[in-house]
Image (cartoon, rainbow, N blue to C red):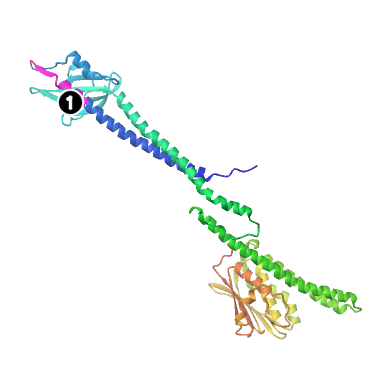
Amino acid sequence: MKIRQPSLARQLLRQLLPLMTAILITGAGVVYFVAHREATVAYDRALMDVSLALASQVEIMDGHVQLQLPEIAEKVLLIDGYDKLFYEVVDLNGKSIAGNIGLPRPVQPFEDGKLYYDGRFNGKKVRVAALISERNGTAFIVLSAETKLKRDWLVGEIVLAMLVPEGLLIIAAMFMIRRSIRHGLASILPLKDELVRRTHTDLSQLSLKDIPEEIYPIFSEVNELLVRLSAALDAKRHFVADASHQLRTPIAALQAEAEMALRSATPGEYLEKIVAGTRRVTHLAHQLLTLSRLEPQQMQAPKMIDLAELTRDAAERWMPLARQRNIDLGFELSPAKVMGDPVWLEELANNLIDNALRYTPAGGIVTVRCNSTASQTIWEVEDSGPGIPTEEHERIFERFYRLDTTGVDGCGLGLAIVREIVHNHHASIEVEKGNILGGALLRVTFSQQSDISPAI
């Protein structure tokens, strides 16, 4: 069953939708506020005109306020196609003089003789325009009121007229965003097709032409990964080629010795050479296997290791060989602890001691030391052999590289393994001329603050 992958356009629209909804709601609120204010001002002025017209029809007769409004004038003045209009003339004490009795009375002070307010009349919401006027020194108040149907209708019309285009604009924007994303991502389809056509050995760089800025870093990192993979693949090819070359010679020699033993009447001497050759091949195979397994992901979780104890354990296995070669293998071990993988640190000790024993002539000395300070831990092996030329200090860590020393058996992988283990423990290794024994001195330095967990 094919799993449906999440759509980038859909995710982006899902994130934008709340923002667009908020914009739409905010816009509706602003439009409603503006429309309501403008409609109120316009209709209030029209309602005040009714109050002014009614005030012009008021007369004072025998000291009393009277409204002289012909019936035809009342019909013309109060006609409205949407709302119902009401009026009332009252004195300053609120006593009704003429009109619809019971209109809401003003409760706030007048501004320039005019006042607008909301109220209820006959169970309906009304808007009232109150006007203070006078005739012959007698003051009175004219109240004009109307229901609010056309005001609400006008506000709704304005809000709808604004929101419909805004909503359509948001829908169009979302459609264009989705289309733009699809169009922008279409530019990487040729790269997908290029990757499909490639073989597993083609690690050439991807073209970054016309790649959108937002996804450019991804393809840039892919190219960096391809560079690293290409380098790793080349290293593997070289390793396999070198390993094949290194194995071919001792295996061919074994075959030749075995054939000679079969034809010889006294095969004993050939059998000894076969055993020695088998040991060399076994050692080489072990070194090759060790080097191929030296991947950070295959290392164990780091733990605190006592280098002095680990060194003594490793050295006990090399004592018989040292006595056989008449080499004085000694130790100067002080308390020293580091965080690391005990298996690989033991392999490090084995290769350093083995290397020193191989290049130290009979009757020589090999000394293994470890000590610790507040900032670092040092682990070193010094011998009384011929030493290592300065120009060879870097090359001796290359795979299958051996110093031009006659009579020394080896496969050129021991120090390469040492370098990989040192690297995986974020340590460093130096090659010097020994000040005490005069031969080669190899020093591994561990930082006390180092944490090998990222590499492992």
- Label 1 sits on a secondary structure element that is strand
Q: Is residue 46 magenta?
A: no
Could you tell me if residue 363 is visible in this image? yes
Q: In which quarter of the image is the C terminus?
A: bottom right
Magenta segment boundaries in residue numbering: 47-62
Instruction: Indicate the position of residue 296 as horizontal and vertical percent values.
Output: 63, 63
Q: Residue 101 appears in which quarter of the rendering?
A: top left
Q: Name the residue under label 1.
A: 131
Q: Is residue 278 visible?
A: no
Within 10 angstroms of label 1, few (less than 14), some, or many (20 or more) residues?
many
Horizontal side, residue 194 vs residue 360: left or right: left
In this rendering, is residue 164 above or below 419?
above
387, above or below 227, in the image:
below
Where does residue 52 sit, x and y in percent of width and height?
A: 17, 24
- Residue at x 48%, y 45% (from the top left corner): 180
Residue 233 is drawn in which quadrant?
A: bottom right
When asked about the image quadrant of residue 437, the answer is: bottom right
Q: In this view, does 87 lie above or below 371?
A: above
Q: Residue at x 65, y 60 (%)?
A: 201
Q: Which of 374 and 209 is in front in this view?
A: 209
Q: Identify the amino acid type marked 1.
A: Leu
Instruction: Please state the total of marks drawn on the protein image.
Output: 1
Q: Residue 394: x and y, percent?
A: 61, 76
Name the spot of residue 389 as percent of width and height, x first: 62, 82
* Of residues 33 and 204, the one drawn nearer to the viewer in this rendering: 204
Outermost right residue: 265
- At 19% from the left and 13% from the top, the residue drawn is 71
Q: Assign the N terminus to one quadrant of the image.
A: top right
Residue extending furthest top? 71
